[in-house]
Image (tube, grey):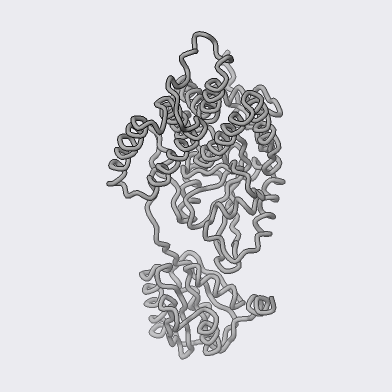
Amino acid sequence: MAEKAEKQFMEIPADLKQLEKYFKDRVGLGTSFDIGQRKLVILKRKVHFYYVNGLSDTQFIVELIKELVHVNDKEISAESLPEIIENRLVHESVEYVKTFDEMADQVLSGLIGIAIEGEKKAMIVDVRSYPGRQPEEPDTEKVVRGSRDGYVENLIVNTALTRRRIRDERLRFEIIKVGERSKTDVAIGYIDGIANPQLIDTVKKELENIHIDGISMADKTIEEFLLKQGYNPYPLVRYTERADVGSIHLLEGHVLIFIDTSPSVMITPATFFHHVQHAEEYRQSPAVGTFVRWTRFLGIWISIFLLPLWFLFVIEPSMLPENFAFLGPNKESDIPLIVQLIVADLGIEFLRIAAIHTPTPLSTAMGLIAAVLIGEIAVDVGLFHSEVILYVSIAAIGTFATPSYELSVANKIFRMLLLICVAIFKAPGFIVGVMVYFLFLISFRPLNAPYLWPLLPFHPVALYQILIRRPVPGSILRPSIVHPRNRVRQRPVKPEK
């Protein structure tokens, strides 16, 4: 702690040799190959440049050095050298820092530090040029119609994509550095006058209270600190990589969290029903969007309850109506049905994990192996009933139809637990398991927002908007779950007289 305090409040020395020693001892100048230094003499006074190769735009640095070298040809007096240099820095972002810690942090962030002999302060010029990819459509949020740009790993690009869609002077991006060593840039995005000030203060306070050496895993680390998630498998914030999705949530009154190095933006607060919506519903007509939404809801329901219900009807055939007596395997097997279901369900998870690690050219071959060798041959040799493969596959399709990847995996965990409850306690196990599941969801209040809102607590108007994709001209009010300061989104059109 003493070392940290010494570093934080240590002033920039007027002697540049001492400053150079600090950079060698603390930052790694001369040891790390990417820490750069350039020494100049301008009007008989020493000027040092410090930068990081790979994070700074070298063309800008060269242009600045050229401009400053010409000062020797056009100026005589060195008394006002700092002002002369500041006026010759042909860049839009120049500021002063007075402590070594501030200077080192800025240099390691990709800016350049300019120190002048005899001055106890340094100029910081923003010449960052982070390596990264161009905005492109996210793989997990594709749409038939709509924009093809998406968030990337560059914080500046992400805020620019958002501001391009919301040109409101009240749009704010407050930046905080998180991590004692990583010093990762985290930006809080909101619209002043719409977002709830208490929510903004809560998010800001939680971020400032994060004391860890680094957040290399970016968004997920922030989520676990922000919401104290623990071992809860259900997502408590919504992630998006689409700039249009992030913008519409800002207009609704949500607070967005942008983390540098992560293309996923966190939307807070988020309920269960935020995770079951997709941008495709709003890129189609209201009727088509509603149909797509209901189909997706059906897929999510199937992913959770189809396998436990089918297994319950197989072990309790008396519960089935006569018209559905055909359900269930026709042949006996030496392997218990619950084992078949769990092994097959885990097999789908194996394939999903393998698909993540399999190069794209080989993914087709892996699919053929899974379908032919594993599926058909396993049924032929008697390891699985054909109906087990059928219903596990349908449940897997429902899992893939879930828009939120985190929600789909959490639903899969609950499905397997519900299967075990049915295997042990039969019908009572299914009923009690479902009740415990809903009570479990009801107990969540991420950032003081009920997780099952608007179902519980019941809000009929908001629930109607979740079930039915309303036309945009009819969506006059913002959702009350975020407690917006201004609830009116648009003025109703008065009929002409």
The residue lying at 45 percent from left, 55 percent from top is 153
Query: x, y percentage for residue 191?
Result: 61, 44
Query: x, y percentage for residue 322?
Result: 52, 8
**Quadrant of image for the N terminus:** bottom right
Query: x, y percentage for residue 497?
Result: 58, 13
Residue 397 is left or right of residue 456, and the answer is left
The residue lying at 65 percent from left, 60 percent from top is 210
Visible in this render: residue 170? Answer: no
The residue lying at 45 percent from left, 74 percent from top is 51
Q: In which image quadrant can residue 90 be found? A: bottom left
Q: Nearer the viewer, residue 392 or 355?
A: 392
The residue lying at 33 percent from left, 30 percent from top is 380
Q: Is residue 235 above or below residue 15?
A: above
Q: How many labels were placed on the picture?
A: 0
Residue 337 is left or right of residue 458, and the answer is left
Q: Is residue 224 above or below residue 345?
A: below
Query: x, y percentage for residue 17?
Result: 52, 90
